[in-house]
Structures are given as C-alpha cells and as structure tokens.
Amino acid sequence: MPPFIIAHRGLHNQYPENTLESFEAAIQSNVDGIECDVQITRDGHVVVFHDSTLERMGHSQKFIQELTIEQVREVDIVHPQSNKKAKIPTLLEVCDFIKDQCLFNIELKNYSFFDHCLEKAVLQILNTFKIESHILISSFNPISLRYFYKHAPHIERALLFYERQSWHNRRALFAPWAKVTTLNPSTCLATKQSIDRFHKKGYKIIVWTINSMDEARFFAKQNVHGLITDYPDLLIKLFKNT
C-alpha cells in the first residue's frame, strides 16, 4: 500500500500557504491529507498560520499572538512567486471547509509548558464539527500532545522532531510519556534503522518534508504511513497515476 500523501500547508507551491485557496487546490489534486499550523490570537481565536510574525508572509514585524482576530483579518498574505493574495483563515473556517474530505493534520504552535489556551480552543472547535476520526494532532511540544491524550484520547497524536533538537528529542524519547500514536521525524532522522526501531515499538511513521521522487520511493519501501510534501501533485503522479 503506498504511503499517504499529505500536502504541507496545502498546495503552497501555487497558492499562499495555509490558506483556504491552498487547501482547496490540494484537495482537488486528490491528496490523502492536509497539514496546517495553528496558533492563537490575543483575543483567543485559533488562526492557521505558520510563522510567529507576519514578516515573511505579510510584510510586518507584528506577532500573531499580539493581534486580535480583526487585525489578523485585515492582513493580506502574498505568494512569493505568483504574487497571489489571500487572507489568513481561522481553524473554524478550515474545518468547515475540509470536514471529512481527507486526513487533517493540525500542528500546534505552542511551546509553553503551562499555557494550554491553544489546545483547549482547538479541542472545542474539533468537538463542534465532530470530525475527530479524520484528525491528527501534531506538535514538537510533548506537553501539548499529553494534554490531548488526557482530554481527547480518541484523537490521533504525532510527535514532531528534527535534527537540530537535543539528543533526547532526536530519538523521540518523550513519545511514550506523551502517549502518541505516530512519530513525525524529519528526513534526516528517518533512516532505515530508526524507522525499523519505531515500527517495532508500534508507531506509525509520517516523514517530513519529502520533495524528491528518490526520497519518496525510499520511504515508500520502508512502509512509512505517510509523506508530508511541498509538492503533493508530483507524489500523486508517482504513487497514484502509475
């Protein structure tokens, strides 16, 4: 069985990342899943946006967490190549659009040990739409994932980790404590040996970010569960249209 193809921030090689336009294009291209990033505004709304500031996408030094939802709605984000513009959506809007059309991987951008406002708000939205069976919650923060295990154990959870983290994080040693079902290593950490080790422990493996055909073929041979990619249209041609 080929791995799930998960569009990293939607089809963002053609549309502004993490936008409704990007997600719609990804679904139309027949992806198995969509990955997005969420954070919380000053007045408690969950918005879909990767960076902590608007500098890269909105040409502003302002932090998302310092803005109200009305201020966020005023921002136009621009695709760096096509110059297409779009608005920053809320998680509520994205859930209403995606519903149960595909796997929906929500990455929590919360690095606090004590503040669970984002987790609470995300869980409330998911409960509203009753789409938990199509959700994968991911984070670099094992405390956020532990929160979801305690309050919504039926929702799948994935621990993200990459090569510039500490030794403990690079080996996913916090995964048992966080009670995750899936591991999301970066390509550098997803060796044949590490994948075999994680599989033996019962974890699903979703690797990021796969942007070459050779990498995709290699990880498919390792029986990983999914591939997060910036070019889902290319991987769809590789695995689904052959």
Image (cartoon, rainbow, N blue to C red):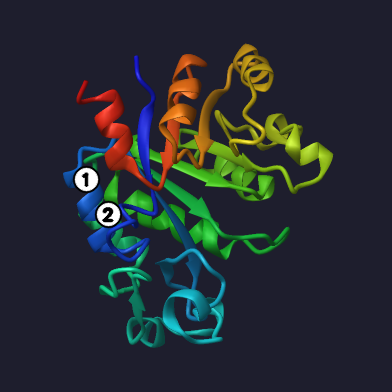
- x%, y% of residue 155? 45, 37
SS of the residue at dot 2?
helix
Q: Say what amino acid the circle numbered 2 marks.
A: Phe
Tell me residue 6's x, y (percent): 37, 39
Instruction: Tell me how many marks there are.
Output: 2
Residue 77 image offset from top left, x and y in percent? 36, 77
**Mark 2 touches mark 1? (CB < 8 Å):** yes
Question: Which one is nearer the viewer's eye here, 2 or 65?
Answer: 2
Could you say which disc has been placed on residue 27 in the image? Answer: 1
Residue pictured at 60% horizontal, 44% vertical: 145
Q: In the visual, does 147 lie left or right of 90?
A: right
Identity of the residue drawn at 75% across and 32% down: 171
The C terminus - image quarter: top left
Residue 23: mark in rendering:
2
What residue lies at 26% left-to-right and 62% top-to-bottom?
Answer: 20
Specify few, some or many for label 2: CA neighbours under 10 Å numbering under 14, 14-19, or 20 or more.
many
Residue at image x 55%, y 77%? 53
Up-down: is 241 above or below 99? above
Q: Percent from the top left, x then y, of residue 107? A: 50, 51
The answer to whether 69 is drawn above or below residue 128 in the figure is: below
